[in-house]
């Protein structure tokens, strides 16, 4: 499982996260690093990833989040509800959070996104997410 076209996105002073993108044969991989969290940060990096999917012509994405801070259920609800407007309509999403203690909030956000027509699944590791994205 090797990616091609690794590209780190420059961290601008007003952003509290960085994203590293890699082109895999069947999907875009996005690794998000940061320490702060909340609705604004979550919606900003998800919008940036959806935009990058369109620029690189991918309809599948594996998002791996490496942010130790947690979101609230309210944050998850708001972002899950806005996933179509953020650009995820028609994009298949595999989501891996390196911090398993955030699983309950992530599941809630996933349920809201699925209810809003987004094809998203949560995974505990990149390998399982990769298998899902490359199996269909």
Image (cartoon, rainbow, N blue to C red):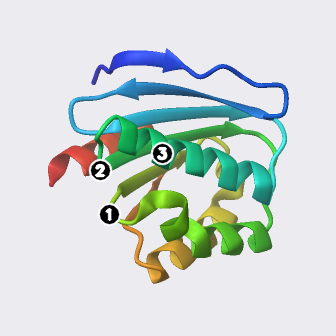
**Residue 116 on image: x %, y %:** 48, 80
Q: Can residue 124 be seen in this view?
A: no
Residue drawn where x is 51% and y is 43% of the image: 49
**Quarter of the figure that contains the C terminus:** bottom left
In front: 111, or 16?
A: 16
Which image quadrant for residue 6?
top left
Q: Mark 1 points at which residue?
A: 90
Q: In this view, does 38 lie above or below 54?
A: below
In front: 22, or 123?
A: 22
Residue drawn where x is 38% and y is 37% of the image: 55
Task: Tell me whether the residue at label 1 lies in contact with that at label 2, contact meaning CB atoms closer than 8 angstroms.
Answer: yes
In front: 72, or 123?
A: 72
Residue 30 in the figure: left or right of residue 73: left
Which of pointers 3 and 2 lies earlier in the amino acid sequence?
Answer: 3
Which of pointers 1 and 3 lies earlier in the amino acid sequence?
Answer: 3
Residue 47 in the figure: left or right of residue 90: right
Q: Is residue 124 above or below residue 2?
A: below
Between disc 3 and disc 2, the foreground one is 3
Q: Name the residue under label 3.
A: 51
Which of pointers 1 and 2 lies earlier in the amino acid sequence?
Answer: 2
Q: How far apart are marks 1 and 2 (CA)?
A: 7 Å
Farthest residue, direction front: 55
Q: Distance between the residues labelled 1 and 3?
A: 13 Å
Q: How far apart are marks 3 and 2 (CA)?
A: 11 Å
Residue 50 in the figure: left or right of residue 133: right
**What is the count of numbered marks?**
3
Q: How crowded is mark 3: few (under 14 residues within 10 Å), some or many (20 or more)?
A: some
Which image quadrant for residue 43?
bottom right
Between disc 1 and disc 3, the foreground one is 3
């Amino acid at each position: 499982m090797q990616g091609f076209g690794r590209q780190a996105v420059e961290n601008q002073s007003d952003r509290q996260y960085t994203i590293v993108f890699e082109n895999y044969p069947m999907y875009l991989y996005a690794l998000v690093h940061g320490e702060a969290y909340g609705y604004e940060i979550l919606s900003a990096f998800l919008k940036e990833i959806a935009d990058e999917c369109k620029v690189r012509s991918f309809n599948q994405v594996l998002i791996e989040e490496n942010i130790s801070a947690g979101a609230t259920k309210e944050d998850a609800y708001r972002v899950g509800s806005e996933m179509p407007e953020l650009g995820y309509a028609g994009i298949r999403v595999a989501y891996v959070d390196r911090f398993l203690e955030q699983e309950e909030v992530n599941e809630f956000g996933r349920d809201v996104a699925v209810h809003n027509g987004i094809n998203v699944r949560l995974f505990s590791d990149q390998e399982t997410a990769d298998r899902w994205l490359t199996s269909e």
